[in-house]
Amino acid sequence: MTSQPLPSASSPVVGELTVPGSKSETNRALVLAALADGPSTLRGVLDSRDSRLMIEALRALGVSLEPDGEALRVIPPVRFRGAADIDCGLAGTVMRFVPPIALLADGPSSFIGDPHASERPMAPILDGLRQLGALVSADAIPFRLVPPASLGSEASVDASGSSQFVSGLLLIGALLPSGLTVRHTGERLPSRPHIAMTVEMLRARGVHVEEPDERTWVVAPGTIAARDLTIEPDLTNASVFLAAAAATGGRVTVPGWPSSSLQPGALFLEIAERMGATVERDADKVTVSGPEQLRGIDVDLTTASELTPSIAALAAVADGTTRIRGVAHIRGHETDRLAALVAELRKLGIRAEETDDGLTIEGGTGLTRAEVETYADHRMVHFAALVALKQPGITVTDLQCVSKTMPAFPQDWARLVG
């Protein structure tokens, strides 16, 4: 694949940028609209590879999804139908949220994906579907799922590898004859805010969800009410643009930032402040101003692991040591993000080490020119783009893999950096 240059910043990055809708909220909203008791209109739906894969997967199962001006009109089927070769790409939400819907279909479904899709953890949720009665042919993509004649009501899964194993089951819980009880059996539960987002979106549609303890969810049987919705901006994507200000001593504003949000990306503002940046919150926007020099910090990203590549980039240009904790599970993301970040940081001349649950990065030693490998991972492009601001001549192997969540990122980034 042809290496592509990334822009450096000869002066502080200053500007304002509107960010498209949240991937996490978009794909949950699409699933809930498909499961609802009537039509829904969704606005602000993210246009990205992951959301397109979700839309096509739902269409394959019998859902009608059609443009309505700038919105999307979603009409659930009378009954879901089985489908062959549902393409999950490399999208965790598609490969973990759509098979539970296939459990409700009138026949078997099969699932395929990108070459690296087979490496993404799937066994816990597929085992959960087996506990509900499904026949599943494998523990990873590709696999075939046969719905049962009689659906169960309890599933115990180890969600240490991904909170999506819990969310995927919760999304269909109300439509099971006796509801659903989900229990997490592992020691750690990463990205808990993503489960909170799932639960709150269910409750907003009239679904009764109880949480008797920190590792159990009980969904009452019933309907999922159709609801029109406007999707929030994607705060993890937005944080990359705000990080450009933090890294260069600039000033960047993102309009539409919600005053409160269940998105884990919202945590970026607190982290930026701890590293020395200034954050200004307004009613409908947020502005980050960078310091003369960022400082290293010790940070637990258990609840917001998607921020790890961007924080690692800031750590590379900060003074002192940064310790990122609580992110062991990102070894099973689009790539092994911990190994990838260490390899690319070292290539850039930065001392970095993997730990059991994260990274240690020695910043402030200066960057060297290098070609950064993306590993087909959109967040590695964000990492590369940020470090390139501080060192001319950095290139990246696959800029277009950012289409997974933000196809216009290269153009928006170039416009902001100038």
Image (cartoon, grey):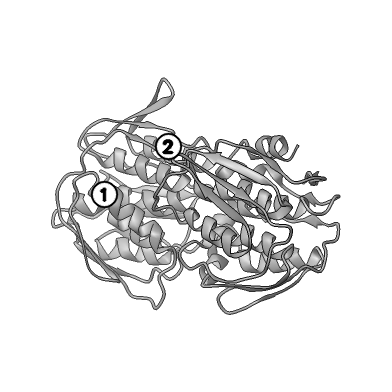
State the residue in front, 137 or 79.
79
Q: Is residue 39 left or right of residue 45?
A: left
Q: Which one is nearer the viewer's eye here, 88 or 172?
A: 172
Dots 2, 1 in contact, CB < 8 A = no
The correct choice, above or below, for 239 with respect to 38 in the image is: below
Q: Residues within 10 Å of mark 1 (few under 14, many from 20)?
A: many
Instruction: Classify residue 304 as left or right of residue 311.
Output: left
Q: Using the numbered discs, state the Cα–Cα distance from disc 2 to disc 1 in whole angstroms.
A: 19 Å
Task: Residue 374: tell me if it is visible.
Answer: no
Callout 2 amino acid: Ile
Query: x, y percentage for residue 322?
Result: 65, 72
Q: Residue at x 26, y 30 (%)?
A: 39
Mark 2 surroundings: few (<14), some (14-19) or many (≥20) residues within 10 A: many
- Give the SS element for disc 1: helix
Q: Which mark is residue 202?
A: 1
Residue for point 28% across, 58% down: 134
Residue 9 or residue 228, whichever sits in front: 9
Residue 162 seen in the current view = yes
**Residue 150 percent coordinates (x, y):** 17, 56
Query: Is 269 drawn above or below residue 274 in the view shown?
Result: above
Where residue 309 sits: x, y (%)? 63, 59
* Image position of 196 (left or right of 320): left
- SS at circle 2: helix
- Could you say which quadrant of the image residue 414 lies in? top right
Judging by the rendered image, the residue that carries numbered circle 2 is: 55
Quadrant assignment for the C terminus: top right
In the rendered structure, find residue 175 and report the number of the disc placed on it: none
Eye-nearest disc, 2 or 1: 1
Give the side of residue 375 with respect to residue 6, left or right.
left
Q: Which residue shows up at 57% across the image and 67% down it?
A: 331
